Structure formats: C-alpha cells, structure tokens
Image (cartoon, rainbow, N blue to C red):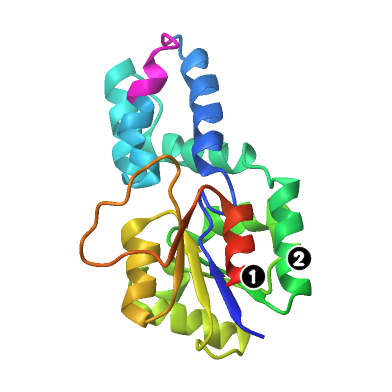
Amino acid sequence: MPLLLLDLDNTLLDRAGAFRTWGERFLDSVGAPAVDIDWLLSVDADGLTDRWDVADAIRNRYGLRIPSIDLVDELHDGVVANTRLDPLVACALRIADDAGWVPVVVSNGAVRQQDAKIRRTGLDRYVADWVISEEAGVSKPNPRIFALAAQRARMPLRGAWVVGDSPEADIGGAAAVGLPSVWLHRGRTWSDTRFAPTRTVDGLIAAVATVLAG
C-alpha cells in the first residue's frame, strides 16, 4: 500500500478560484473598481505573499481604517469560506484508495487555515491524514516534511509519489527525497533545469490516473 503525497492548494482544492471569488466580493464591498481584481491577484501572488503584506497593500491602496489584524483574519477566513471540494476530486481519491494507495496531504501554510479547509470541505473523509508545515516545523521542499507524513501514516516512503502544482515545493521536494512526482501545470511550461517532474498533467484527476497507471 504505497503513499500518495498530495499538495493541498491548487492541487486538491482550488485555492486560486476561492481567492478570486473572495477578492471580487471584497473589492465590491469597499467600492473598488472590478478591474482591480487583477491588481489584487498580482499582490497575492498565488498565496505566496505574506498575509500581513497583502493586508497592508489593500489598506494603503484604498485608505481603509480597518486594523491590519482584522484584514488578515478576513483574508484567511474569506478563502476558507469560498473553498469547495470538487466531487470529481473526491471520486479520484476514493478510486486511489480502492486501488491500494494511501492519500496523505502535505501542505505548506498556517494550521488554522489549512486545517479548516480540509475539514470544512469534507476532504478529511477522503485522505488518511495530513501534515501542515506550521505544525510540523518544516516546510516543503525540505525532505523532512515528507518523512513526517510517512510517519504520520505509519507507512514507508518507498514507493510513494508526490503530486502538486509548485515546481519548487512539490517537485523540488520530491526530487530531494528521491520520489517520482506529478506536476499540475495549470497552463504553465516547466522551466527549472535543476530537476523535473516524472509526469506533467493538467489536474488532480489526471494525476491520480497517471499514478495508478504507472
């Protein structure tokens, strides 16, 4: 029973779509023009920008008096509230489980937000366990977080696959620990010359199919 080590944001769950939905509603609530969503997405940088920096950028652009800490809470909670589990993703995870694979989430990020996404969407019913970097004290691509995931599932790392959308965190992490990987390209072209994914696909469902076939 090999491990299937899965990224969370923009792999199992559509974080980009959830942030856009929240952002459009938030901008409307502060009277900002709809086109400003492009600016907000740029500042957010697919979730890589620190939430405090995003909050400060929003406050400065629109002259808001809301405390930064409240806006950071809004950024966290708004994304969680707008995150949904695609039924087809749930089905793919069930198929993987039935085929003998053990799905475990390995995610960088804050426990409060990532844990809430997993539980609120019902994703917790389709995975064996999850490891979040803030709690683990180590982040992808460090090999230790994958070892911790294996320990959590009481499974060996040998034979595992890593699936994710981040070239550095997911595919780089897989390379560092010596595991095969599937990269979700999301319309991008691979450009890193240090390592490369074993397979490249356009989404989680195709990724699971690739692992099962491989």
Q: Amino acid at mark 2?
A: Ile
Callout 1 amino acid: Leu
181 and 16: which one is in front? 181
Would residue 100 be found to the left or right of residue 113 on screen? right
Residue ID at (64%, 57%): 118
Estimate how packed mark 1 is, as few (under 14), some (14 to 19) or many (20 or more) residues with alpha carbons within 10 Å.
Answer: few
Is residue 47 on the magenta stretch? no
Location of mark 1 (residue): 212
| Element on which disc 1 rests | helix
Q: Position of residue 44 (x, y in %)?
A: 36, 36
How dense is the environment of label 2, judged by Cα within 10 Å: few (below 14), some, or many (20 and up)? some
Give the x, y percent position of residue 16: 49, 38
* Bounds of the magenta segment: 32-39
Residue 3, position as x, y percentages in the image: 59, 79
Q: Residue at point 67% right, 77% down? A: 101
Residue under numbered circle 2: 95
- Is residue 72 in view from this perspective? yes
